């Protein structure tokens, strides 16, 4: 990344601003704005998230907020109620209180003498979510948003559930917030009240995992904050951004198709990161794109930003399987509209072991194909949402394919490109009332290496006759059902000589929590068992390819000093005596000092997912987080531990929270409960 030392506008930074809310709560903000903004007011851009603006996101924020401010904007990073140095308690994500607070913050910003009355929202992940949600509430000052790595549907396409299946990332993410919510405000800013505010958080933030697991279907809890319920409520321009290694690529396609406002979509090879910090690369000059976007919609500058294709996507070339990539080879392609006339679904019937060419039909009189996958199928799946640290992308799929029903195309005779969401239709039956399927699409090289391109999950109780995510139905063992499994959207090129593979399994652990018991699946060849590939067969209809992006650039990050190195591991083990297997993930960021405020930070997370042979009752997920803060004589730390197990009828949840001050335990709490399984 190129460091920018000189900006068009000299800026000032207000490190600690308290924004008052009508109920008396004060939120902590950090504001970067042009030095002359009192004399020449500017639009204000809000990023409203719970990740602690003074320490945990300070390094990242220092790269892009001063940069944008130096181009004529007031950039405002506000800690949500109950996070960082803000007052109150944070009890869940995207609550009505949070969205009301955001509207109050926007109104406050619009009234400041250095703001011209126009505001915007931006953010990645949580900040991308609430940017969409607040936009649907139509606050008067809001002029545009940028939403990165977010979703319009909190149930069907988020970290909690996928295709009605419970994701292990639901446990992982809940544990992350369990740890973050246990952290204190900084006494250097809030004074002697820090301990009172800290203990309020420790006592009342709650265990969010329990809440999320008590809503196992798409009910009103998930509909709240899902702008897919009424996309027409959004009336401001939207830029939607994600990456193919991220968990949120699908929403970009849906927003482009469903919104009726000026909109742009950007999909790169990245994991869960802003594109100027994008990994895998190539990273792009995203901040330059942001400035052009804000200039057009907040200042009315006719700069041609909307002349770009509606969708710009990184068409990935074939690569060997790896859990980590520095760069993904490929090229940028553009589509002027979405859905695009250049994308045509190619229909391929699935016959035993084969993907047939279009126009060739499978014999419906063939015997059904049967499968009961080993519980371990999924051990090389990587995480649902990649953070590219530690290496968390899917590895060679051949061992997974050994526990799956596999269909291969013949070797391709010419390059094939797909852009969009592949769909696999299956006519199937099962021998249990609860079942799931995982479907993977892979690129198979001539030497047999299989690189997963995309995948999808489906809880079959959500796809039975008269069932959906809101109204699941138990399956009738032996009865045939026709289901469709939508795979995650992707842009991928398959070279000549390679084969395309569809693999179907009845387990995908530990990415997704298994069904209550092993399932025997029967797939019936015929007209209802097929794969639909979104082939980009008429690129001439897309118009010219998009102009290249600039080099990534940003302002110089704040200075930090590493005091203790971190550790990153992703270990898979199999005990062939007792048949116990486990996936152990360590993400230890070590200890660093934020030099400007003299604060030492320690963060370590350990996740362990285990099982014994094919015993579905043995499945177990455990996460342990340690957070530490130290400055001089002030030292606090917290340790959170969350364990999730299951029986055929219930999920069993156990969690502990311990907090220490100056080496002595000052708080301890235990959560323990069981939650009935609801068709999951």
Image (cartoon, rainbow, N blue to C red):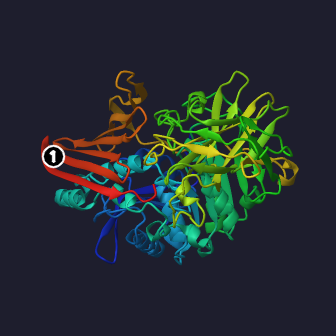
Identify the residue under disc 1. 661
| Residue at screen point 52% across, 75% down | 137
**Spot occupied by residue 499 in the image (x, y as percentages of width and height):** 75, 32
- Quarter of the picture containing the N terminus is top right
Q: Nearer the viewer, residue 172 or 357?
A: 357
Q: On screen, 352 above or below 532? A: above
| Residue at screen point 30% across, 45% down | 643
Residue 87 image-quadrant placement: bottom left
**Spot occupied by residue 514 in the image (x, y as percentages of width and height):** 46, 45
Q: On screen, 290 above or below 327? A: below
Q: On screen, 235 above or below 632? A: below
**Spot occupied by residue 581 in the image (x, y as percentages of width and height):** 40, 30
Secondary structure of the residue carrying tag 1 is strand
| Residue at screen point 56% across, 33% down | 403
| Residue at screen point 60% across, 63% down | 465
- Quarter of the picture containing the C terminus is bottom left
**Spot occupied by residue 503 in the image (x, y as percentages of width and height):** 64, 38
């Amino acid at each position: 990344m190129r460091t920018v030392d000189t900006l068009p506008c000299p800026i000032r930074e207000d490190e600690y601003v308290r924004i008052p809310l009508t109920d008396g709560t004060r939120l902590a903000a950090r504001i970067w704005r042009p030095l002359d903004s009192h004399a020449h007011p500017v639009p204000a851009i809000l990023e409203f998230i719970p990740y602690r603006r003074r320490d945990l996101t300070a390094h990242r924020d220092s790269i892009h907020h001063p940069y944008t401010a130096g181009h004529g904007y007031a950039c405002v990073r506000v800690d949500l109620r109950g996070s960082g140095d803000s007052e109150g308690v944070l009890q869940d994500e995207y609550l009505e209180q949070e969205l009301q607070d955001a509207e109050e913050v926007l109104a406050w910003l619009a009234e400041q003498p250095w703001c011209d009355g126009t505001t915007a929202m931006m953010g990645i992940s949580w900040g991308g979510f609430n940017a969409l949600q607040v936009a649907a509430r139509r606050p008067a000052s809001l002029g545009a948003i940028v939403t990165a790595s977010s979703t319009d549907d909190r149930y069907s396409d988020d970290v909690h559930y996928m295709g009605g299946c419970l994701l292990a990332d639901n446990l992982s993410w809940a544990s992350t917030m369990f740890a973050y919510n246990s952290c204190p405000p900084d006494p250097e800013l809030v004074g002697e009240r820090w301990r009172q505010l800290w203990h309020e958080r420790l006592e009342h933030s709650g265990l969010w995992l329990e809440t999320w697991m008590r809503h196992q279907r798409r009910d009103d809890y998930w509909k709240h904050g899902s702008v897919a319920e009424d996309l027409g409520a959004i009336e401001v321009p939207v830029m939607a951004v994600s990456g193919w290694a991220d968990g949120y690529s699908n929403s970009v396609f849906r927003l482009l198709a469903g919104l009726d406002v000026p909109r742009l979509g950007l999909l790169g090879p990245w994991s869960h990161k802003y594109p100027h910090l994008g990994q895998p690369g190539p990273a792009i000059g995203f901040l330059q794109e942001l400035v052009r976007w804000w200039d057009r919609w907040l200042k009315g500058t006719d700069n041609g930003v909307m002349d770009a294709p509606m969708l710009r996507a990184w068409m990935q070339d074939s690569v060997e399987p790896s859990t980590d990539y520095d760069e993904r080879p490929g090229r940028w392609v553009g589509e002027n509209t979405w859905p695009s006339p250049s994308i045509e679904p190619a229909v391929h019937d699935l016959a035993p072991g084969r993907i047939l060419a279009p126009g060739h039909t499978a014999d419906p009189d063939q015997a059904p194909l049967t499968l009961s996958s080993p519980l371990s199928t999924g051990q090389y799946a990587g995480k649902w949402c990649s953070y590219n640290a530690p290496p968390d992308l899917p590895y060679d799929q051949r061992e997974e394919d050994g526990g799956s029903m596999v269909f291969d195309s013949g070797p391709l005779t010419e390059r094939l490109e797909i852009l969009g969401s592949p769909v696999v239709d299956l006519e199937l039956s099962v021998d249990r009332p609860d079942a799931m399927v995982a479907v993977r699409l892979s690129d198979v090289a001539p030497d047999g290496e299989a690189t997963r391109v995309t995948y999808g999950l489906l809880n079959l109780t959500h796809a039975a006759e008269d069932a959906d995510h809101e109204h699941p139905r138990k399956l009738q063992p032996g009865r045939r059902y026709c289901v469709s499994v939508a795979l995650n959207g992707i842009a991928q090129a398959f070279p000549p000589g390679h084969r395309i593979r569809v693999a179907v399994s009845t387990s995908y652990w530990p990415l997704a929590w298994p069904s209550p018991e092993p399932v025997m699946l029967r797939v019936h060849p015929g007209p209802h068992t097929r794969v639909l590939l979104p082939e980009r067969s008429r690129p001439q209809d897309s118009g010219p390819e998009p102009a290249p992006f600039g080099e990534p650039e940003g302002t110089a990050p704040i200075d930090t000093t590493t005091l203790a190195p971190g550790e990153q591991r992703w270990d898979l083990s199999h005990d062939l005596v007792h048949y116990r297997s486990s996936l152990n993930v360590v993400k230890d960021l070590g200890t660093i000092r934020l030099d400007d405020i003299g604060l030492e930070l320690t963060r370590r997370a350990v996740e362990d997912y285990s099982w014994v042979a094919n015993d579905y009752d043995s499945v177990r997920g455990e996460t342990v987080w340690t957070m530490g803060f130290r400055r001089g004589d002030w030292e606090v730390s917290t340790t959170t531990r969350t364990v999730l197990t299951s029986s055929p009828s219930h999920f069993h949840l156990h969690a502990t929270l311990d907090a220490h001050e100056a080496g002595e335990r000052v708080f301890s709490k235990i959560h323990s409960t069981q939650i009935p399984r609801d068709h999951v």
